[in-house]
Amino acid sequence: MRTLPLLADGFVDLVLGSRCVGCARPGRPLCGACRATLPVTASPRRPSPCPDGLVPPYATGDYDGLLRALVLAHKERRVLALGAPLGQLLAVAVASAVGAVGAVPAGPVVLVPVPSRAATVRQRGHDPTLTLTRAAARATGRVSGGEVLTASVLRLRPGVVDQAGLDAAARAANLAGSMTAPAAAVRRLARRCPRAHVVVCDDVLTTGATLREAQRALEAAGVPVLAAAVVAATRKRSAGPAPVARS
């Protein structure tokens, strides 16, 4: 069972010599003082240049300082105890994204994580984006009182390389046509949530290529996308208002 490794990792994170990723204070991976400084609001963050047709993306802040330290420690160093606070941050972005489009018709909000490469998941020993998305769904549901679900309906086709170090054009080329939403997964989602309001989720927004490809794959399968939500956005390529939400 996956529960036992998670408990073991949490024990190591919290007890055996852990330090706060923000201030290096001995103890928890995120101390109370640093947790208190985390953003409690999110705003639209449009990459520049912005991929054509990208739905409004929302982020809680710049990919810098504490937010960057949290994402990297969870993703690369497997500090799994940080999944909860990162999930809460993603939930803030989700709530802002859903609230910004005005009155949403009846139906659950469905969070769809961008898929990770299988080799990367094996190397890291976990899927950080899926973990954050599930945590965000729980946190959003507790606050809103509505139904918020996670649906991993996207898959990566072979041939996608690691995005690190690629510029905007290279990222777009690498991801073009790389994702698919298998018909069986879409049918299961439709049966479970016939009037779902989909928000695509990721940890960091850089060029927008990943979110746009996820959106394309979903819409090609007949699944409309309401918005996108991330924990943080790179400052260099985030400026200006978000695109107007489509009805």
Image (cartoon, rainbow, N blue to C red):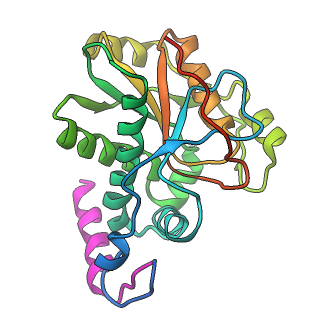
- Determine the residue positioned at 62% across, 36% down: 241
Q: Position of residue 166 (x, y in %)?
A: 79, 50
Give left or right: position of 200 versus 91.
Answer: right
Give left or right: position of 212 versus 146.
Answer: right
Give left or right: position of 192 versus 207.
Answer: left
Q: Which residues are magenta?
A: 1-21
Q: Position of residue 3 (x, y in %)?
A: 23, 57
The vertical placement of 233 against 33, above or below, is above
Residue 5 magenta-highlighted: yes
- Determine the residue positioned at 59% across, 59% down: 63
Main SS of the magenta part reads: helix
Q: Nearer the viewer, residue 113 or 40?
A: 40
Q: Is residue 152 visible?
A: no
Q: Nearer the viewer, residue 17 or 69?
A: 69
How many numbered marks appear? Answer: 0
The vertical placement of 12 against 179, above or below, is below
- Determine the residue positioned at 37% across, 75% down: 34
Q: Position of residue 30 (x, y in %)?
A: 35, 75
Q: Position of residue 204 (x, y in %)?
A: 56, 50
Q: Quadrant of residue 178?
A: top right
Residue 209 magenta-highlighted: no
The vertical placement of 117 against 7, above or below, is above
- Determine the residue positioned at 57% across, 28% down: 214
Q: Is residue 238 visible?
A: yes
The vertical placement of 203 against 218, above or below, is below
Q: Quadrant of residue 44?
A: top right
